[in-house]
Amino acid sequence: MITDSDMDAIFHALAHEARRRILDLLRDKPGQGVGELAQGFDVSRIAIMNHLAVLEKAGLVISEKDGRVRRLYLNAAPIQMIHDRWTDEYSAFWAGRVTGLKYAAEAAAQKAKTGKDAT
Amino acid sequence: MTSTTGDTPLPQSATAERAYYKVVIEAPIETVWNTLVKTDEVLPFFFGAVCRTPNGLAPGEPMAMQSKDGKYTSVVGTVLEFDPPHRYAHTMMFTNMDDPPSTVIYELKEVDGGTEFTLITENVPAGTKSEKSMAQGGPFITGNLKALVETGRPLMSGRMVTMLGPVMGLFTPRVCRSENWSFDRIRGL
């Protein structure tokens, strides 16, 4: 199963705000190149490439060469394995219900506050 | 939680970006391959379905993912590539959805300590129910295949679908009945 050193790499990668944002951006737009990704940040392209190296080492990002561009994809499988380690039939059901309720309530509160649909 | 699956329907021809699901499985490449391409046996990592074919898995051959009793067919497709033990690709279509077929590619690579297994989905019709199902299927298949090969037992998600298998028939629409999905019809898709 997932080893402790795998987990160390994953949690280390997830421990930085910029790297978590990179994962958000890749989830929302898979296959983008490094240049396009870097546009979403104030830091240098080199800094982004360093973050990408950490994410790739943890297996959270997959890159594929496509001609001259390096296309980037999110790999959600390691996060799924962390989830599985602490979840069983029973807790997955209730944790799902509780988080579902939390998201629904927060969206409703947001809507009441701004009068708009939270997306 | 935002995703690329918007509410606005996209034109029929639009397909989603490729998606990757990758794990390292602590087992020899042959073991992973042989588990992946098993036919006529319940496969927990394929949602408890049995992969049935008329003449085995070879390029151009049709395949059907069926319930254990053979009554229902959930997924149909055609084998595109079969290159043991490294690469296997097939088209796939959900029988209960009206969407064009997607492509699934499985890549196996020997690495230190085991086998790197990558599931890639391509040509998934964007903004459809099929796209959602494929996105849920990716982590399910990779996670359950890894657990099954390493421990002899699927994850709890895999155990649950296997447990639910006999019950699912009751909720399965008529269109999924296997008599509607002969291998000849699958060939013609």
Image: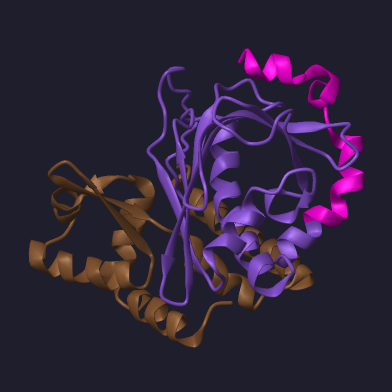
Chain colours: A brown, B purple
Report the quarter where the N terminus of chain A lies.
bottom right
Q: Is residue A102 visible?
A: no
Which residue corresponds to the image point at 62% horizontal and 77% vertical from the top-left?
A85
- The x and y percentages for residue B136 are 59, 48
Give the image location of residue B22, x and y in percent. Answer: 46, 59
Residue B96 magenta-drawn?
no
Looking at the picture, tell me which residue is in the foreground, B180 or A24. Answer: B180
Q: Residue at x 25, y 46 (%)?
A: A32
Which quadrant of the view contains residue B171?
Answer: top right
A32 to A44, vertically: above or below: above
- Specify start and end residues of the magenta stretch as a single range: B161-189
| Count of labels in the image | 0
Decide which of B167, A92 is in the foreground and name it.
Answer: B167
Q: Left of A64 or right of it: where is A80?
A: right
Question: In the shown orientation, is residue B44 left or right of residue A114?
Answer: right
Residue A80 in percent (x, y) is at 55, 65
Q: Is residue B2 above or below residue B93?
A: below
Q: Image quadrant of residue B172?
A: top right
Q: Is residue A63 above or below residue B24?
A: above
Q: Residue at x 34, y 75 (%)?
A: A13
* Residue A25 visible within the image: yes
x and y percentages locating residue B39 in the rendered image = 73, 44
**Image point (54%, 30%), residue name:** B59
Q: Quadrant of residue A20?
A: bottom left
Name the chief secondary structure element in magenta: helix
Left or right position of B136 against B43: left
Residue B176 belongs to magenta span: yes
